[in-house]
Image (cartoon, helix red, strand yellow):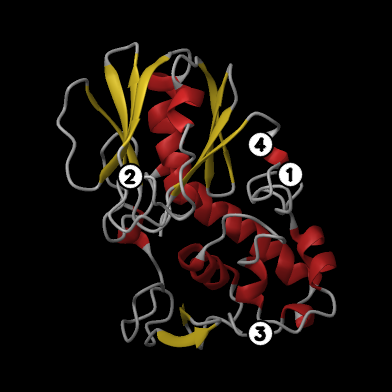
Amino acid sequence: MPELPEVETTLRGLRPHLEGYKVRSAKVREHRLRWPVEPDFEQHIEGARILKLERRAKYLLVHTDKGCAIWHLGMSGSLRLVGDGTVPEKHDHIDWRLDSGLTLRYRDPRRFGALLWTAGDPLAHDLLGHLGPEPLSTEFNGDYLFSASRKRRQSVKAFIMDGRIVVGVGNIYASESLFLAGIRPDREAGSISKGRYQRLAGAIKQVLQRAIAQGGTTLRDFFGGDGQPGYFAQELCVYGRTGEPCRSCGRPVRDIILGQRNTFFCTYCQR
């Protein structure tokens, strides 16, 4: 599933080609996504001028002078720009034709993504209003994690993947951040000291920033908004490396199941 760095990469790739431009027309070829696209969505977006793009968690917000479109890429969705008149393929479900001559095209083979519309404040939408702080914000730090974790018996990995605690730390980046911080993923969240949470908050920021800088992680069929794949997967320390030597100590990387998710760690480097 595209995670925060992939969505941020998509935003940065699309921003210069969308902001300030008008949507001349729109075509929804498939309404049956994770949540059905409104029957009159095309009427909402046609003629709208795009004012700005921003990201909240794994959602891409497209603010216009008529309202806001909320995109979620789901497990296999991607947004890319194509030339006007480019023939859509099987899984190309939505087009926005821009007055620049380009078309914003949404592809989603599994149809687990979503496109929603709101005329109100998108940050108050039911999907976004309950979310925790952004991991790259100053609000997110070790003191915050320590305070929020008290008396919690869930694993620390599940804790940092909870969007009510912090947004956008998905399975890949949780495993990588815990490795960098030297913390076992199955430790109880409430048993970890403030000092270790300070290291973990710093590790989360470092891992996400490095992934964003390299264009996100390519898994399965994700591509960024500019059509280029991410390359962070080449630098993964533990995720998906079961049995391979730890990059720090050389011992085999282990995997366990936590919260029905594969979890990767080094039994020597993480305690």
The residue that label 3 is drawn on is 187
Image x and y of residue 141, in percent? 74, 55
Choose between 269 and 137: the one closer to the eye. Answer: 137
Please give the name of the residue rendered at 47% of the width and 18% of the height, measured from the top-left corner: 19
In the structure shown, which secondary structural element does the residue marked by tag 3 occupy? loop
Query: In terms of sequence position, does the residue under pointer 2 or pointer 3 come before the other?
Result: 2
- Nearer the camera: disc 2 or disc 3: 2
Choose between 131 and 147: the one closer to the eye. Answer: 131
Q: Amino acid at mark 2?
A: Glu
The residue that label 1 is drawn on is 138
Residue farthest toward the front in the current orientation of the protein: 39
Q: CA distance from mark 2 to mark 1?
A: 40 Å
The residue that label 4 is drawn on is 122
Q: Amino acid at mark 3?
A: Arg
Please give the name of the residue rendered at 59% of the width and 60% of the height, measured from the top-left corner: 203
Examine the image and state in which quarter residue 237 appears. Answer: bottom left
Task: Check contact, mark 4 vs mark 3: CB within 8 A.
Answer: no
- Nearer the camera: disc 2 or disc 1: 2
